[in-house]
């Protein structure tokens, strides 16, 4: 204890230790003197010399302690270096799969340094691989003594308890992880789900075995049919018939469990006839029937059974063949493959299984091709795509084949809108629009000139085709264009006039949803081209926007006032048209009272531009415009542009018509306007 105290970094601790050391030396010296006393002690003692001796002894002891502390520190540093080297050797052995050697190296490292937490958790991980779960738990407990908030220790301990079927203890370990770091919600959720599935699997297997032992007919029939299917070298029709009988025997979770526990999934692995027929690239009629039978069987054994779903996807042949089955020319195989995949997408766990085990880079292209089908396959494929869109990993994998495979197919579908399944096409366009939330995908699509041309072709055809399904395609493609217009590039600038002219034509449509989206596209395409602005202004866009804004809802108002603000920003004709169309600015004043900050900001922006028209400011003399603009200029809007645009408009109003300054003074608004002068320096 004295050695530790003397080597402490805390000066207070060292001072106390020095005092304690001197006291101990004094006591020891005193006891020695008492032992040496005689009955007649006539020795003359030089007290000054004794004090010097005690001091010398104390200094010597302290020097020894200090030397010992330094030696210990040097030794620890050497041991730490050796322990780190042994840890790296253990890690290398672990990566190579030699877990026994890894354990040996980690153990040697701990002999050098007993309190190195990483060595305990690494050795615990190796013990898990060796199925020595109790030892793994012991190492995790030692790791927690070294660092009580070691998340890896709790994670590995939870795994070990789960392997030992200690479900409650496993859950407690994972709950500790969440307590230590609340950001680990995803890890916690996955771990708890694993425990729940394992516990359910054990209960199902225990119940299934009881039913077998009790002689329940359905349970016994499953095991007997699997035994018959295990016979080698039979005709392919024999196996197809047996698989169909087995499918009919699977009625509930008990039969599903017995299928799993009796190695039902090995049918594909161990039977060469079955495997060859299922994996054949060009299938004969008999091989196609066998494949359909297998797909129906897997649907029966995997419906609502996540453990069976996991085992099926873990099978290498199934994993490899799913994309090929989807692309098969046999409609029945495609139909049942889609049905099997749909089972996985019924819940979050199944969806994650599919995304984790499958390479989905080609799936968007494969499933999109079903838009050409006129039957239920098209709808099933779109349902699958919609569900996969919930997974970020799917979106990431979609980038790989986007330019080379997906966009050419998508463009072809758009240009053939009359010939394909239009209901499915509308959903497909919506899915592509949702994919545009990914910046990388949006950028690639926005730079595809063929994609823009195909969108314009579909807009042109809307005047010839008025069926409800086709109009859904039109509605979807306008939404896609809005998303793509979040980007800015030369192709968009080049196409701006064509896009805006199509949207102007759609403003006459009777469907309010289509009109709203057409205005939305205008609000995003016009900033890309001054030529487009001139064309729409000539086409009467200002008058049309004012008409819509008089009775529009919030979304249409957002798009409409944004369109007006763009047109009036640089086009004098647009400013004059607005003053004529909106007498006394009644529409703009109404928008300035909106609770939507985006609408208010653009309305103030638009008003500021139009005040340059002679007489415009005077027409507002008897209105509440000063009070309204003052409120926004001095307000606390979350969007700074609201305050800025209101201040600019107020400044321009007072310059254009000085009589507004009187109203401003009555409202004590000069101070607010002065504080906003940084926004109106251009007035």
Image (cartoon, rainbow, N blue to C red):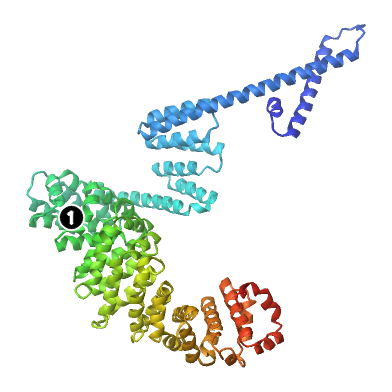
Question: Which of 500/175 is in front?
Answer: 500
Report the side of 14 relative to 462 (left or right). Answer: right
On-image quarter of the C terminus: bottom right
Q: Is residue 164 above or below residue 197?
A: above
Report the side of 670 relative to 256 (left or right). Answer: right
Please provide percent x and percent y for residue 247.
18, 57
On-image quarter of the N terminus: top right
Query: For the residue labelled by badge 1, is the local secondary structure a helix, a strand or a loop?
Result: helix
For the point 24% across and 54% down, the residue is 255
Q: Is residue 401 above or below residue 555?
A: above
Residue at mark 1? 294
Q: Is residue 127 above or below residue 420?
A: above
Question: Which of 105/238 is in front?
Answer: 105
Please provide percent x and percent y for residue 127.
41, 34
- Tell me if residue 148 can be seen: yes
Q: Residue 53's quadrant in the figure?
A: top right
Report the side of 667 relative to 149 (left or right). Answer: right
Q: Is residue 262 above or below residue 605?
A: above
How many numbered marks appear? 1
Please provide percent x and percent y for residue 461.
25, 79
Q: Residue furthest left?
A: 235
- Tell me if residue 218 can be seen: no
Q: Residue 672's quadrant in the figure?
A: bottom right
Few, some or many C-alpha atoms within 10 Å of disc 1 (few <14, some 14-19, many ≥20)?
A: many
For the point 39% across and 61% down, the residue is 438
Question: Which of 542/576 is in front?
Answer: 576
For the point 83% across and 13% down, the residue is 33
Please provide percent x and percent y for residue 408.
25, 63
């Amino acid at each position: 204890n004295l050695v530790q105290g003397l080597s402490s970094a805390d000066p207070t601790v060292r001072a106390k230790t020095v005092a304690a050391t001197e006291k101990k030396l004094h006591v020891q010296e005193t006891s020695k003197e008492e032992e040496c006393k005689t009955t007649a002690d006539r020795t003359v003692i030089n007290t000054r010399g004794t004090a010097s001796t005690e001091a010398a002894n104390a200094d010597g002891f302290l020097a020894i302690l200090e030397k010992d502390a330094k030696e210990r520190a040097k030794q620890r540093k050497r041991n730490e270096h050796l322990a780190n080297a042994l840890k790296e050797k253990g890690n290398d052995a672990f990566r190579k799969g030699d877990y026994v050697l890894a354990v040996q190296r980690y153990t040697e490292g701990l002999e050098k340094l007993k309190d190195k937490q990483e060595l305990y958790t690494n050795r615990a991980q190796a013990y898990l691989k060796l199925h020595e779960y109790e030892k793994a738990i012991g190492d995790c407990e030692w790791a927690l003594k070294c660092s009580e908030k070691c998340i890896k220790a709790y994670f590995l301990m939870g795994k070990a308890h789960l392997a030992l079927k200690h479900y409650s203890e496993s859950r407690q370990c994972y709950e500790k992880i969440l307590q230590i770091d609340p950001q680990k919600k995803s890890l916690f959720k996955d771990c708890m789900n694993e425990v729940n599935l394992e516990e359910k699997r054990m209960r199902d297997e225990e119940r299934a075995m009881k039913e077998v032992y009790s002689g329940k007919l359905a349970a016994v029939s499953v095991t007997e049919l699997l035994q018959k299917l295990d016979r080698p070298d039979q005709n392919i029709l024999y196996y197809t018939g047996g698989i169909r009988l087995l499918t009919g025997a699977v009625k509930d979770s008990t039969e599903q469990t017995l299928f799993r526990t009796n190695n039902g999934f090995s049918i594909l692995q161990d039977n060469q006839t079955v495997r060859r027929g299922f994996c054949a690239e060009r299938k004969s009629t008999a091989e196609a029937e066998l494949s359909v039978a297998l797909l129906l069987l897997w649907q029966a054994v995997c419906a609502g059974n996540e453990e069976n779903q996991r085992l099926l996807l873990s099978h290498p042949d199934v994993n490899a063949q799913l994309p090929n089955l989807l692309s098969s020319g046999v409609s029945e195989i495609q139909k049942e493959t889609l049905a099997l995949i749909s089972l996985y997408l019924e819940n979050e766990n199944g969806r994650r299984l599919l995304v984790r085990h499958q390479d989905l880079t080609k799936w968007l292209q494969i499933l999109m091709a079903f838009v050409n089908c006129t039957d239920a396959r098209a709808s099933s494929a779109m349902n699958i795509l919609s569900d996969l869109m919930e997974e970020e990993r799917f979106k990431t994998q979609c980038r790989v084949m986007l330019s080379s495979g997906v966009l050419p197919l998508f463009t072809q579908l758009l240009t053939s809108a009359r010939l394909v399944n239009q209901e499915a096409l509308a959903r497909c366009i919506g899915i592509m629009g949702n994919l545009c939330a990914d910046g990388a995908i949006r950028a690639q699509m926005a730079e595809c000139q063929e994609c823009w041309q195909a969108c314009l072709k579909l807009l042109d055809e809307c005047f010839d085709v008025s069926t409800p399904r086709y109009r859904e395609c039109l509605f979807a493609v306008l939404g896609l264009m809005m998303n793509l217009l979040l980007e800015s590039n030369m192709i968009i600038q080049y196409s701006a006039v064509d896009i805006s002219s199509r949207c102007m034509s759609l403003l006459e449509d009777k469907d309010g949803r289509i009109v709203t989206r057409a205005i939305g596209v205008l609000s995003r395409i016009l900033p890309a081209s001054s030529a487009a602005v001139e064309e729409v202004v000539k086409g009467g866009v200002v008058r049309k926007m004012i008409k819509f804004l008089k009775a529009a809802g919030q979304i249409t108002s957002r798009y409409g006032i944004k369109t007006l603000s763009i047109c009036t920003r640089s086009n004098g004709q647009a400013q004059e048209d607005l003053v004529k169309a909106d007498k006394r600015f009644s529409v703009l004043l109404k928008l300035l009272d909106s609770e939507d900050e985006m609408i208010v900001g653009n309305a103030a922006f638009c008003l500021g531009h139009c005040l340059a028209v002679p007489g415009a400011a005077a027409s507002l003399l008897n209105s509440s415009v000063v009070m309204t603009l003052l409120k926004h200029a001095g307000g606390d809007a979350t969007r700074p542009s609201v305050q800025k645009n209101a201040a600019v408009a107020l400044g321009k109003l007072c310059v254009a018509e000085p009589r507004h300054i009187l109203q401003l003074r009555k409202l004590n608004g000069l101070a607010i306007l002065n504080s906003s002068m940084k926004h109106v320096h251009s007035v």
